[in-house]
Image (spheres, rainbow, N blue to C red):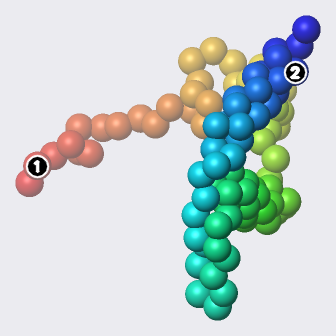
Amino acid sequence: MPWKLILFLAALVVATVFIGVNLDNRCDVNLLVRTFKDVPVFVSLLFAYLAGALSVVPFFLKRDRRAPPRQLGEGVDRSAKKARGKGASRHGEPERYSSRDYSID
């Protein structure tokens, strides 16, 4: 069996047990405009879960405007590496420094 199916069934069993245990527990839900009396606890938690899931949907559907990541080796000019020869750096010939470049005066 696939692991996703097993985990889904386990979560379903836990949710069913939670609902069964809390059938008698009731609470009042205040929405600033209206108050609902004697609402089962699992119903209020179910609506809280749905509100959280719906609040994530815009971020899930947002398109990514960044450039796609480059593949390894893409954009590398392999002919330049062969033309450089031995001893040259990636950016061309190495710079030559003289003792004048390091004077402190």
Image quadrant of residue 1?
A: top right
The kind of residue on which mark 2 rests is Leu
Query: Does dot 2 land on a helix, a strand or a loop?
Result: helix
Compared to residue 55, the image places residue 2 above or below, namely: above
The residue wearing badge 1 is 104
Q: For the C terminus, give its image quadrant.
A: bottom left
Image quadrant of residue 66?
A: bottom right
Say which of marks 2 and 1 sits in front: 2
Q: Earlier in the sequence, mark 2 or mark 1?
A: 2
Along the viewing direction, whichever of 61 and 41 lies nearer the viewer: 41
Please state the horizontal and vertical placement of residue 43, each as a whole percent of the image: 72, 57
Please state the horizontal and vertical placement of residue 68, each as a whole percent of the image: 82, 47
Q: Residue furthest left?
A: 105
Q: At x 58% / y 63%, what residue is drawn?
A: 27
The residue wearing badge 2 is 5
| Total number of numbered discs in the rendering | 2
Image quadrant of residue 97?
A: top left
What separation in Å lies between label 2 and label 1 (alpha carbons)?
A: 73 Å
The kind of residue on which mark 1 rests is Ile
Apparent side of residue 98 relative to residue 33 in the rendered image (left or right): left
Along the viewing direction, whichever of 56 and 98 lies nearer the viewer: 56
Q: At x 78% / y 62%, what residue is drawn?
A: 54
